[in-house]
Amino acid sequence: MIIYYLIIAILLATTLFLVWRLYQQRKSSQSDDLEIERTINYFATSLFGKNTIEEILWDVTKNCISHLNFEDCVIYLVDEERKILVQKAAYGPKNPKDYEIFEPIEIPLGKGIVGSVAVSGIPEIIANTTTDPRYIVDDDLRYSEITVPIIYQGKVLGIIDAEHHEANFFQSKHLFILNTIASLCANKIMRYQVEEAYRATTIRLHENNRKIAENRLSVLRLQMNPHFVFNSLNSIGNFILKNEPMKASTYLTKFSKLVRLIFDSAQSEWVSLEQEIKSLELYIELEQLRFNNKFDVIIHVSDDINRGTLMVPPLLLQPFVENAIWHGLMPKEGERGELYLHYWLNKDRLCMSIEDNGIGRAAAIQSRSGRISTLQKHGLKLTDERIQIINEIYHAHVHAEIKDLSDDLGQPAGTRVILSMAIKQ
């Protein structure tokens, strides 16, 4: 009877022990699960604010040391052209300073544990590295190693590799955590690479569009310049035919200076306001000679403008000045013609106005022949297109406004054109 009760007691004690052990295992498992969940959440949160590959990799290596108690952690990336793995981030003895690796090494694909995992794409835990002939000593011999590939859509991008001086240190929980981290890294790396490729493509497209626009701008300038060059040569010819050699010589001298300034400005899309005013002065003087000084000109520049440093597109005002002279002042009879150019600053913008006391736009349209009207429309169209391209390329925000002027009786009294643009020093 005693033996019977003894057996019952032993069975009861064994059952209680097994229940207690199962409870402890479940408790330990739940604790491990909670630890794994917290660790992964931390890594995911930490990676959220990292935008470059360098930031991503260094953040992972640092957190592997501090949160997983690893002694050494290195991340390699695959160099596809050279078929090697390159150390890109490290924490531990390999990292004496921030973002710096001590004596970084390169491992050929397929060589060593790291190279083997990069080829197979299968993570490995090495319980004792001294028994694995593939083990490569880097900075120091350590007995445990865990190697996890960073894979995106079946392609190995890199390796997370950690070591510890204790044998059998790395457990299945470490493998689960690193696999999850590697997946997070892969997504972040690919996202960054896609964004970088998109940015590079956008930059190339922008540069190509810019070159196309600049070429178009040059073509427009070439189309505009011969217009008044042709007229100038005609005027020189007329002076010669009228046997006025002094006027022809004076005209030719001014014309040669203007052509030289135009050629100088052709080397750049921007010139100083000083150079631009000189070009306009020469052009206006040529027109005054051509039309026997039928009009006067006044050019006023505000004192707060530095002509030498303030930059403008070359010959920006010339088409408007030409239009004012040819279609506003030349048809005018009686009262002497006046042309007034004014430059001033309005906050962060340069303002330029061309004002004439000519016959006005309505009367000018009625007095023109069809050919002249067509030329004028073509010239203004080229000018509008040029301004549009300048705004697209340089964001100069050039704006043109044309206003008809009238006297006290409401009669046409000329035209005022105002151009404004963002200041470029």
Image: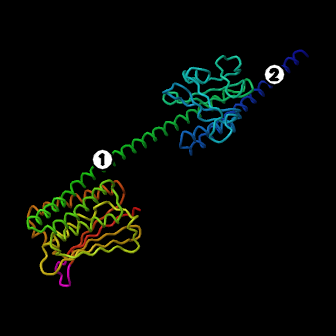
Residue pointed to by mark 1: 212
The secondary structure type at the circle numbered 2 is helix
Nearest to the eye among marks 2 and 1: give it.
1
Q: Position of residue 313 (x, y in %)?
A: 32, 60
Q: Is residue 346 left or right of residue 239?
A: right
Residue ranking furthest to the right: 2
**Dominant secondary structure (helix, strand or loop) of the stretch shown in magenta:** loop
Residue type at mark 1: give it. Ile
Task: Using the numbered discs, state the Cα–Cα distance from disc 2 to disc 1 in whole angstroms.
Answer: 87 Å
Number of other residues with Cα within 10 Å of mark 1, as a class: few under 14, some 14 to 19, many 20 or more: few
Segment colored magenta: 406-413
Residue pointed to by mark 2: 14
Q: Position of residue 68 (x, y in %)?
A: 69, 35
For image coordinates 62% across by 22% down, the residue present is 113
**Rendered-image quadrant of the N terminus:** top right
Q: Is residue 355 left or right of residue 205?
A: left
Can residue 1 be seen at all in this image of the molecule? Answer: no
For image coordinates 41% across by 73% down, the residue present is 304
Can residue 178 be seen at all in this image of the molecule? Answer: yes
Q: Quadrant of residue 230?
A: bottom left
Sooner in the amino-acid sequence: mark 2 or mark 1:
2
Is mark 2 in CB contact (under 8 Å) with mark 1? Answer: no
Q: Nearer the viewer, residue 39 or 123?
A: 123
Q: How many marks?
A: 2
Q: Quadrant of residue 358?
A: bottom left
Q: How is the image coloured?
A: rainbow
